[in-house]
Image: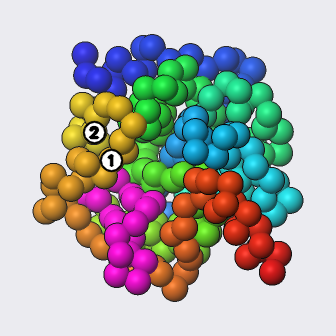
């Protein structure tokens, strides 16, 4: 059994929290799912940053709304039971919710769980975090548009020439991620396959700022309300 197969066998999703939905293909034969990794323990923030207030919702609610309004045909949310219990029905509308029972195993476990729940019809998965509120619908749509022209390999965004996230992983690339462990995402594996990389400049469409500390969060609020 592959590592992804083991993940499928070990995680739990309470029936009352399983909001299964597959969005329409919106007229496109090429479908791309979004996988939001939101099971982090927020050690540097000191509180669950997924639930921090932001623009009338939460940090997590904001990225869920961006996905809902985008060209993504499915949104898979991987989070913890504690965070899931605090999310409202409106935030979870149209979302496939999956619980990571072992978030202490790091980001790799969330990534593998999320990919295991992507619709069989999806050609790729856009891997998103909840702590980059500057990534809006325009960024998501540009990446999806570029990927559907050549749905293979790994599409990496550039912010003014600097590699960043979210990355879009073609389904054919996923087997390379089966052996990931610990608190790392796809970046380490992607670096080992330079021939699979494609880049698209989207710095004019959004911001790559991570919100990891109380100081960064306060600066975000000041910038937003400034």
Which residues are the magenta region?
Answer: 152-169
Q: Please identify the quarter of the rendering in which residue 20 is found.
A: top right
Q: Position of residue 114 (x, y in %)?
A: 47, 36
Above or below, comparing residue 200 to residue 13 in the picture: below
How would you classify the magenta stretch by its main secondary structure? Answer: strand
Please identify the residue farthest to the front as the structure is shown: 215
Magenta highlight on residue 160: yes
Left or right: 225, with 147 as reference point: right
Q: Position of residue 207 (x, y in %)?
A: 55, 74
Residue drawn at x 36%, y 42% as measured from the top left: 184
Q: Which mark is drawn over residue 84?
A: none
Left or right: 178, with 95 as reference point: left
Q: Position of residue 173 (x, y in %)?
A: 25, 47
Q: Position of residue 226 (x, y in %)?
A: 81, 81
Residue ID for mark 2: 177
Q: Please identify the quarter of the rendering in which residue 165 is found.
A: bottom left
Q: Give the class, few, some or many, for how many residues have Cα within 10 Å of label 2's Cα (few <14, many ≥20).
A: many
Cβ–Cβ under 8 Å for marks 2 and 1: yes
Residue drawn at x 29%, y 59% as measured from the top left: 154
Above or below, comparing residue 102 to residue 185 in the picture: above
Helix, strand or loop at disc 2? helix
Q: Give the class, few, some or many, for how many residues have Cα within 10 Å of label 1's Cα (few <14, many ≥20).
A: some
Residue ID for mark 1: 186
Q: Quadrant of the N terminus?
A: top left
């Amino acid at each position: 059994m592959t590592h992804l197969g083991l993940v499928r066998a070990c995680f739990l999703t309470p029936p009352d929290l399983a909001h299964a939905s597959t969005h329409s293909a919106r007229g496109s034969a090429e479908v791309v799912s979004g996988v939001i990794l939101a099971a982090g323990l927020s050690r540097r923030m000191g509180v669950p940053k997924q639930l921090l207030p932001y623009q009338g919702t939460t940090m997590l609610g904001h990225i869920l709304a961006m996905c809902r309004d985008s060209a993504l045909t499915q949104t898979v949310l991987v989070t913890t039971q504690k965070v899931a219990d605090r999310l409202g029905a409106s935030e979870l509308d149209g979302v496939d919710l999956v619980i990571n029972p072992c978030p202490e195993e790091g980001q790799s476990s969330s990534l593998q769980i999320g990919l295991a729940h992507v619709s069989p019809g999806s050609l790729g998965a856009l891997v998103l975090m909840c702590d980059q509120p500057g990534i809006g619908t325009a960024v998501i749509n540009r990446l999806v548009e570029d990927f559907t022209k050549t749905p293979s390999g790994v599409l990496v965004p550039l912010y003014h020439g600097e590699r960043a996230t979210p990355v879009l992983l073609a389904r054919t690339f996923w087997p390379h991620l089966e052996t990931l462990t610990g608190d790392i995402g796809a970046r380490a594996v992607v670096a080992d396959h330079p021939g699979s990389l494609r880049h698209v400049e989207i710095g004019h469409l959004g911001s790559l700022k991570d919100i990891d500390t109380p100081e960064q969060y306060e600066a975000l609020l000041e910038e937003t309300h400034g």
